[in-house]
Structures are given as C-alpha cells and as structure tokens.
Image (tube, rainbow, N blue to C red):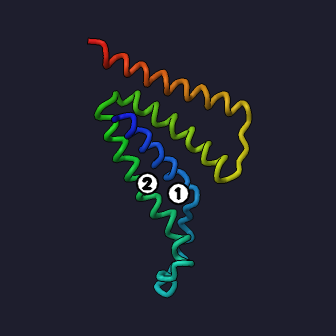
Amino acid sequence: MAWIYIIIAAVFETAWTFSVKFFKLSDLKLLTWHNFYKVDFSFPLLAPLLGYIIFGVGNVYFFSLSIKQLSTATAYAIWTAATLVLIKIAEVSFFNKTVTWTEVFFISLIMIGIMGLRFQVQHINQVP
C-alpha cells in the first residue's frame, strides 16, 4: 500500500508544482470586493493558490502515510523520481514541450532505478 501512497503523493506534487508555476502573488492585488464574486475574473487568479494549498496538503498527507511503511530514504527517492517523470509527461502532454532522446534515456534510467528499489524492498520484506 505504501507504493500506492507514494504514487498518489507524486501526482499531488506534480499538480502542486504546476500550481506554483502559474501562481502570481501580484495578481491577488487585483482582487477587490467588487470583482471577487465574478467567477470569470476571480477564479483564474485564485485557482493556482487553491491548488497550491490543496495539492500541497494532499502531497504531505500521502507521503507521510508511505514513510510509515517504507524507509524514509527509499520513499523519498521513489517519490522524487516519480514526480520528475510525471512532470515531464505533463509538460509534453499538456504544454507541448519537446522531449529529446537524451531525456528519454535518463528518464528510463530513473524508471529502472524505481523498479530496482521496488524489487529490493520486496526482497527484503520476504527474507525472514
């Protein structure tokens, strides 16, 4: 179950990262009582802030559940690697960024490392 928690935490971290990317503190100064309730104006300004809070809390919650069952170093390595892979997938899928063969190679190495940690932890749990 810890591995599922890590993947969920990585998804929240990916969403949190893009919330940070689109959050502009200076835009909040544009909000006044007169335009706060206008959804077409206030929602684009508040959505990154709400995402920052919600995705940040979700990330911390699920990551904390995973480190209760796995070693902290293993959980952190897998969480970081999975987040990097998900961020690259999101950039290519949603933001039309390009991906080079070098990036594919190194992302593949990251995925091999995640699988290696998964099998290593599974092997340790089976040894009496």
Side (left or right) of 23 relative to 123: right
Task: Choose the circle earlier in sequence order: 2 or 1.
Answer: 1
- Residue at point 52% right, 76% down? 42
- Residue at point 31% right, 16% down? 126
Side (left or right) of 64 relative to 10: left
The amino acid marked with disc number 2 is: Phe
Given residues 114 and 41, the one toward you in this image is 114
Find disc 2 in the rendering and name its residue.
Answer: 55
For the residues bearing labels 2 and 1, Cβ distance under 8 angstroms = yes
Residue 67, label in figure: none
Instruction: Give x and y (percent) for residue 53.
Output: 42, 59
Find disc 1 in the rendering and name its residue.
Answer: 19
Instruction: Give x and y (percent) for residue 47.
Output: 50, 66
Quarter holding residue 124: top left
Given residues 71 and 108, the one toward you in this image is 108
- Residue at point 46% right, 85% down? 33
Q: Residues within 10 Å of mark 1 (few under 14, many from 20)?
A: many
Quarter of the image for the C terminus: give it.
top left
Q: Secondary structure at mark 2?
A: helix
Q: CA distance from mark 2 to mark 1?
A: 8 Å
Q: How many marks?
A: 2
